[in-house]
Image: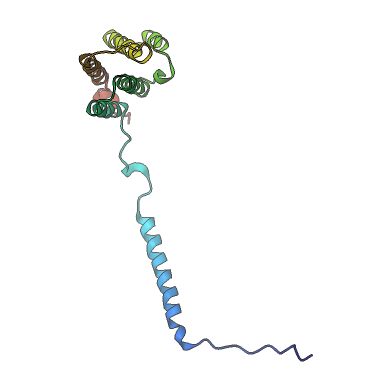
Amino acid sequence: MEDIHDIKGLVPLPHNWWWLWSLLILAAVLALVYWLWKRKQPTDATNAPPPPTPYELAIRALQQLREESPPVEEFYTRLSDIVRRYLEGRFHLRAPEQTTEEFLYEVSQDNALAQEHKDLLGAFLQESDLVKFARHHPEQSDMQRALEAAEKFVRDTQPRAQEVVAPA
C-alpha cells in the first residue's frame, strides 16, 4: 500500500499573481462599461430614416438607366421593370407578375390612374414589348422619348403632399 498517499494540505497562492487579479478586474470593468454603453443606445427604429418611397426608387433607377445607357434590349427591359415596380409600389397593382395585356386590362378597370396616364402607360409598355419580344430596333431618339415618357409618368403620378401625410 505504498502507492496510496495522504492528501496534501492547501497550497498557498504565490504573491506574484496580482497581475491575474488585475486583469480579471479590468475585464469586469470593461464588460460593465460596454453593457452600460449598449443599454444607452436607442434600439427603436424611430431614429432610422424612412425607407425610400416607390417614387424615389423609380426616379433613382431612371436616372441610373439614363447614365448607364445600356444596349437597346436591356434598356427597354429595365425601363419596363422600373415602371412596373413603381406601379406595384405606388398603386398596389401586380404589374411585374402580369403580361402587358393582363396588366393593361386591370389598369383599364381601375380608377387610380387618369385616362391620359393609362394611354401613356399602354403605349410605353407595348413599345417595350416590341423591342423585347419582336426584335424591334428603335432609334436613339425613340429610346430617349421612351425614357422621358417613363419619367413623365412617374412624376405625374407621384403622391401629393396630402396623400403622403399619415393620419394622426
Q: Is residue 165 above or below residue 36?
A: above
Q: Is residue 112 above or below residue 60?
A: above
* Towards the viewer: 3 or 108: 3
Examine the rendering and report whether any part of residue 93 can be seen. no
**Residue projecting furthest to the bottom:** 2
Quadrant where the C terminus sits is: top left
- Give the residue displayed 33% in from the left and 42% down from the top: 46
* Towards the viewer: 89 or 162: 89
Q: Is residue 41 above or below residue 149?
A: below
Q: Is residue 37 above or below residue 145?
A: below
Residue 157 is situated, as x and y percent measured from the top left of the image, at 27, 18
Indicate the colouring scheme: rainbow
Residue 45 is situated, as x and y percent measured from the top left of the image, at 36, 43
* Towards the viewer: 74 or 104: 74
Q: Classify residue 47 by image quadrant.
A: top left
- Give the residue displayed 42% in from the left and 70% down from the top: 27
Quadrant where the N terminus sits is: bottom right
Residue 94 is situated, as x and y percent measured from the top left of the image, at 42, 19
Q: Disc count in the image?
A: 0
**Residue projecting furthest to the right:** 1
Examine the rendering and report whether any part of residue 158 can be seen. yes
Residue 142 is situated, as x and y percent measured from the top left of the image, at 23, 13
Q: Classify residue 165 by image quadrant.
A: top left
